[in-house]
Image (cartoon, coloured by chain):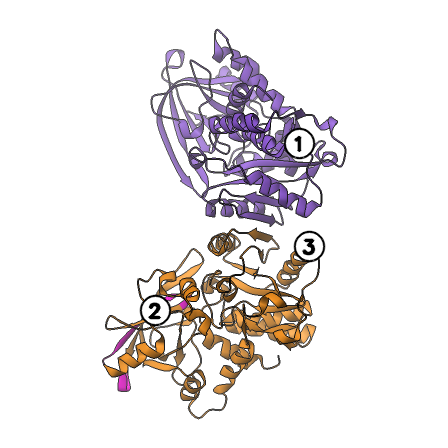
Chain colours: A orange, B purple
Amino acid sequence: MEDIPALARGCAVLGTGGGGDVRTGALAARRAMETYGEVPLVRLADLPEDALVVPLSGIGAPTVGHEMIYGEDEPRRVVEEVERIFGRPPTAIMSSEIGGSNGVAPVAWAAQLGLPLLDADGMGRAFPEVQMISMHVAGLPADLVIMSDIVGNVVTIRPIDGLWSERLARAVCVAAGSHALMADYILTAAQARGAVIEGTVTRALEVGRSTEGAAEPLAALQRELGAARLITGKLTDVERRTTGGFVRGTATIEGTGDDRGRTLRLELQNENLVAIEDGEVRAMVPDLITVVDTETAGAIQTESLRYGQRVAVLAWPCDPLWRTPKGLETAGPRAFGYDLEYVPVEESVKEESRG
Amino acid sequence: MEDIPALARGCAVLGTGGGGDVRTGALAARRAMETYGEVPLVRLADLPEDALVVPLSGIGAPTVGHEMIYGEDEPRRVVEEVERIFGRPPTAIMSSEIGGSNGVAPVAWAAQLGLPLLDADGMGRAFPEVQMISMHVAGLPADLVIMSDIVGNVVTIRPIDGLWSERLARAVCVAAGSHALMADYILTAAQARGAVIEGTVTRALEVGRSTEGAAEPLAALQRELGAARLITGKLTDVERRTTGGFVRGTATIEGTGDDRGRTLRLELQNENLVAIEDGEVRAMVPDLITVVDTETAGAIQTESLRYGQRVAVLAWPCDPLWRTPKGLETAGPRAFGYDLEYVPVEESVKEESRG
């Protein structure tokens, strides 16, 4: 895990709101590795069946996380509680969501704990709510959440289901200053098979490296992702508010160049959820929608969207797990309150190019 | 513990807002004893040093608790978590606050659990915030809170101090529908000596019995409590709102009879905090202030205050523990945001009668 800048770039593309600024996470990762040493990346196949894997993520509103300093003690306090409950220490930690800061910060947490990082995550992207995770789709029970905040409080939740997990964790998060470290769906390597999305740390590194030294970074990124470009243009309107631990709002992009005369509106809840043009949905969750700088192809996180930015909006398919009935029930458009039938981005974009 | 009606009347006098309607608590206590049998009342001196005592209380806004049904499973879930953490079952349960429903409902919880009830509590009255408890004043750490809600979620908080305990517990309570069962300051009998207020269940029973068959119930209650009567009159204005898990507001009583021409205003936060007449404070926390019906001397809980009620306002001294510097820091007027120097009710009432 040496190429933190590439990892951070890749994670930023895979999630635009998760747990704070990727630069903060990258800084924490580099510092922790300087102090505590290298973090080995391990594959699930390398772990013994009963190895305990602790998925970790920062939970909070990104506009708060942006300015938040990661403490050094939160991972230790979470692991102390894990040991108290399971009677043994964890073997590896895992990123709960590879997208955004939560894909990078686990390198810091792993370094601080002296544990390897599993090459996997629970989303293959980022989602704003804690029950939107592959372990839930795989049918593992959401029966234990451990949270640790920067002042030193530790909260253990034994929820009856994922929705209560989200509701209670969010309430604790807001009370703790809108930011906390969370362990969710702690599981053995045996349980993790088929219940986590493997190879996503490596994938984020590949995405991050794709633009390195490229003559046309945007084209290189688009190729690496297999993404459609929904629009190229200028950000003309951004409306954002932080409520109940989430950032919600809309961003409007007016086309320039070949796209002159077109307008795309993005609806946000930490992540870009839906892209709409002329009343037609062009892409929607759980597929990925990311706003990138037209020059550098660097992803622009939700909290950094500003009037006047020159951007392209890319959209590409999510992990197949999210397209199963349980996956769509968990993180499809209806899970976010949109009365929309899910249409895969490959189709909605094809229809559009037909029209 | 047979005289539930007397206990309920006494608890209502000792606290007007704690954890819901005393009638609901009394009903739950009677039903639980019918199903599970008698609840023995034990004294602290009867318990072995290492006996584990679990203080329990309902936490929530009384206007919600009023309509809330107590579940049967919350005490069991809390005790399961206690056993998981301490590695042994509890010996007795205790009421965290004797005032209000939280003084009566523990009889139900003890019956359901098949455990005795300790003749003690943590307040000798009721207070709206969870850190306002004798164990905190005695210097015991607020390092563990276990909460259980009616849907079945269990939350364990390891807070850094009592204020964080309050903040996080309240947030969980609000997320759980503004009502939950809570175990706080779980302690051994050895730790409990000097850290709990003993004999308060017996005291509540005495207070409840004092008006039974009395020719002048109000005078009998006043005598039993050693209380001053601040005013006798009519409730002319009640303003209440539920925010952040609390009921806050004011109640205005206009004097009748001998008190004609006088007006007393009560400030409320679940409990009656301060009594003011002509800009002068006549009684204040941590001393007790209770509104009672002039005919029956039955206490009127905060959520039942209504325009037109004929009432007397009684005020009497709190347990000496609350008058220590740490006691006043914890639950004196400043702890509630009032810029007032504490004056014991015996003095403020004396001054008044002088004037």
Q: Residue at x 56, y 52 (%)?
A: A157
Q: What residue type is labelled 2?
A: Tyr
Spatial separation of the CA atoms under disc 2 and disc 3: 43 Å
* Residue at numbered disc 3: A84
The percent coordinates of residue B170 (x first, y second) are 51, 44
Q: In this view, does B324 lie to the left or right of B167?
A: right
- Queried whether the magenta region covers residue A266, the answer comes back as yes
Report the chain holding disc 1. B
The percent coordinates of residue B249 (x first, y second) are 41, 34
Report the chain holding disc 3. A
Closer to us: mark 2 or mark 1? 2
Report the chain holding disc 2. A
Q: Residue at x 48, y 62 (%)?
A: A64
Q: How crowded is mark 2: few (under 14 residues within 10 Å), some or many (20 or more)?
A: some
* Residue at numbered disc 1: B196
Q: Is residue A258 left or right of residue B158?
A: left
Spatial separation of the CA atoms under disc 1 and disc 3: 29 Å
* Residue at numbered disc 2: A342
Are labels 2 and 1 assigned to the same chain? Answer: no
Numbered label attached to residue A173: none
